[in-house]
Amino acid sequence: MSRSRLAAAVLTMTAIALAAGVLLPDLGQSAAWSLAESVLVFFLAATAGAWLARDRFVVPALAVWALIWTVVAWMLYLVAAPVHQAPIGAILQYNWLAIVLSGAATVAGALCGRVLAGRQGGPLVARHTG
């Protein structure tokens, strides 16, 4: 995979994941909706990134996922720190299910995107026919 294709795939995944927070409708502040939104967003973002990369994208997708969750946890900490309400451990404890399931969705999306890229005559098809 070329570096430019990988960079474009990573930027695409990041843009989709970040834009989804603005574009998805606000269906309330329930924990279930937040969990479903996180899983859906990371699955779709990783699928798009992997489709664009057309090659192995699981590790770069997990790197983007980890970076985004690190920023989210840090921002939650910064919001709660002035009132001494949420040490980072409590933030991670509250969000652990979303973190784990969105990580699994990221891997699934990266694999799904790779399969979709292969079905459109990408590198996977060329390897299997020759």
Image (spheres, helix red, strand yellow):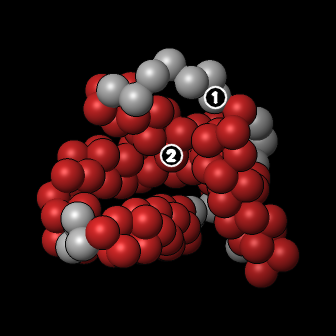
Q: Would you name the residue on which mark 1 appears?
A: 24
Give the residue drawn at x 34%, y 66%: 80
Q: Amino acid at mark 1?
A: Leu
Where residue 52 appears, as percent x and y from the top left, is 75, 53
Q: In what quadrant of the picture does the N terminus appear?
A: bottom right
Q: How far is disc 1 from disc 2 in space, using C-alphas?
A: 13 Å
Give the residue drawn at x 43%, y 73%: 78
- Helix, strand or loop at mark 1: loop
Where residue 99 appears, as percent x and y from the top left, is 31, 54
Q: Residues within 10 Å of mark 1 (few under 14, many from 20)?
A: few
Give the residue drawn at x 34%, y 35%: 35
| Relative side of 77 to 127, left or right | left
**Which residue occupies the foreground of this view, 46 or 30?**
30
**Which residue occupies the foreground of this view, 115 or 74?**
74
Give the residue drawn at x 71%, y 46%: 19
Residues at marks 1 and 2 touching, judged by CB atoms closer than 8 Å: no
Report the mark closest to the observer, 1 or 2: 1
**Which residue occupies the foreground of this view, 7 or 1?**
7
